[in-house]
Amino acid sequence: MKTFEHFNARSVEEALSLLKEHAGRACLMAGGTDLLGKLKDRILETYPDALINIKTIPGLGAIREDVEGLRIGALTKLAEIERSPLIEEKYPALAQAAGSVASPEIRTMGTIGGNLCQDVRCWYYRYPHHMGGRILCLRKGSGPCHAVKGDNRYHAIMGGKACFAVCPSDTAVALSALKAEVRIAGPGGPRAVPVQDFFTPLGHRLNPDELVEEIRIPDPPHGCRQTFLKFTLRKPMDFAVGSVASVTTVRDGICVDASIALGGVAPTPLRAEEAERVVKGKPVDPETAEEAARASVSNAKALSGNAYKIEIVKALVRRALLLTG
Ligand SMILES: Cc1cc2nc3c(=O)[nH]c(=O)nc-3n(C[C@H](O)[C@H](O)[C@H](O)COP(=O)(O)OP(=O)(O)OC[C@H]3O[C@@H](n4cnc5c(N)ncnc54)[C@H](O)[C@@H]3O)c2cc1C
Ligand code: SF4
């Protein structure tokens, strides 16, 4: 592993100033569960000159409620989110998503900010350098996308254009259905981006001189029911082959509001807007759930080896709606 400078930032301002000083050659480190593996495997051609540890910034690891809803500091551990009585009661989809991530050890180290900003898991992209040399590809800025003609069984079935790696974050899916926003600190002052818009086909909307400070979630609709379901190959620890978060409000037997997000199927978490349209104004019975499940994959375009994901997503959406409707 190449040597690098290490800084313990004591404040958001200090972290931002170190980012500026190193002009794209420094990397923020929270729990390190994603970043250190990437550095050890030397999957990228360029290495950072410096790591800026942000765990030393006080006050970024709190869960608070105020008039606008819930505020979760970027350094809050996934295990704390999973176990928070407040989140379990009012935002169970998020508690379930956080609890589905990896193993207890990783949830105890990994933070929500790092979970949102983690890099993709495409096996071509992550191929370790010490096993015969890293694999360059379009996402690394050099070469083709190997998944198009290669083994693409875990890749995107929707929304992929040049890169077909899926967004690996489970919490992003629940936060997307809960209409949360990411609060970003940067040299130009703070800004907010809805979680749904935070992700891009090749990463996220953070500039190199910015950091995620907080996640804000508005109060969920009164009386809504929520769930997060995830299909994995290896239980109990694996990334999602497909996942769904559903937040549904039913009054007098009729669905008046539905927010459904899909994970593991696209480079970003994806709102299933067609499915939401199908359920709104109807009772959520097996027939409607089936129709919504079909609608949720109406845009799907499978690669050579991942058409099976379409059936998995349909089953997850159907189940989620029947659980929450
Ligand atoms: C074996 C294994 C299994 C896993 N399974 C799952 C899974 O099932 N579901 C899932 O969702 N994830 C899974 N993960 C990923 C895991 O959740 C992430 O590694 C973890 O959440 C990252 O958090 P961290 O604090 O350790 O981030 P770090 O590793 O410290 O950082 C990750 C990235 O985010 C950036 N970053 C961190 N914090 C901030 C911030 N506040 N602002 C801006 N940038 C920031 C860092 O610069 C780095 O690029 C798994 C990981 C492993 C190793
Ligand atoms: S899916 Fe993306 S990360 Fe994977 S090989 Fe293709 S371009 Fe690279």
Image (tube, grey):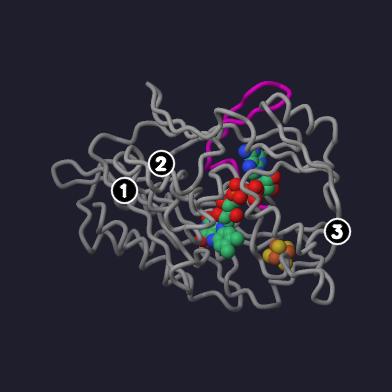
User: Hey, what amino acid is under mark 1?
Assistant: Gln
Quarter of the image that includes the N terminus:
bottom right
Magenta residues span 183-201
Q: Which residue is mark 1?
A: 226
Along the line of sight, the residue nearer the viewer: 282 or 191: 191
* x and y, in percent, of residue 18 in the image: 79, 31
Residue at (57, 70) in percent of width and height: 154
* x and y, in percent, of residue 106 in the image: 54, 56
User: Hey, what amino acid is under mark 2?
Assistant: Leu
| Foreground label between 1 and 3 | 3
| Marks 3/2: CA–CA distance | 37 Å
Q: Which residue is mark 3?
A: 45
Name the secondary structure under disc 1: strand
* x and y, in percent, of residue 203 in the image: 67, 49
Q: Which residue is mark 2?
A: 178
Name the secondary structure under disc 3: loop
User: How many other residues sit within 10 Å of disc 1, few (<14), some (14-19) or many (≥20)?
Assistant: many
Sequence order check: which comes first, mark 3 or mark 2?
3
Along the line of sight, the residue nearer the viewer: 134 or 59: 59
User: Hey, what amino acid is under mark 3?
Assistant: Glu
In this rendering, position of residue 110 left or right of residue 47: left
Q: Taking the image as drawn, is residue 205 in sight? A: no
| Foreground label between 3 and 2 | 3
Residue at (73, 65) in percent of width and height: 125
Is 196 contained in the magenta span? yes
Task: Confirm or deny contact between disc 2 and disc 1 (CB under 8 A).
Answer: yes
The answer to whether 228 is drawn above or below residue 74 in the figure is below
User: How many other residues sit within 10 Å of disc 3, few (<14), some (14-19) or many (≥20)?
Assistant: few
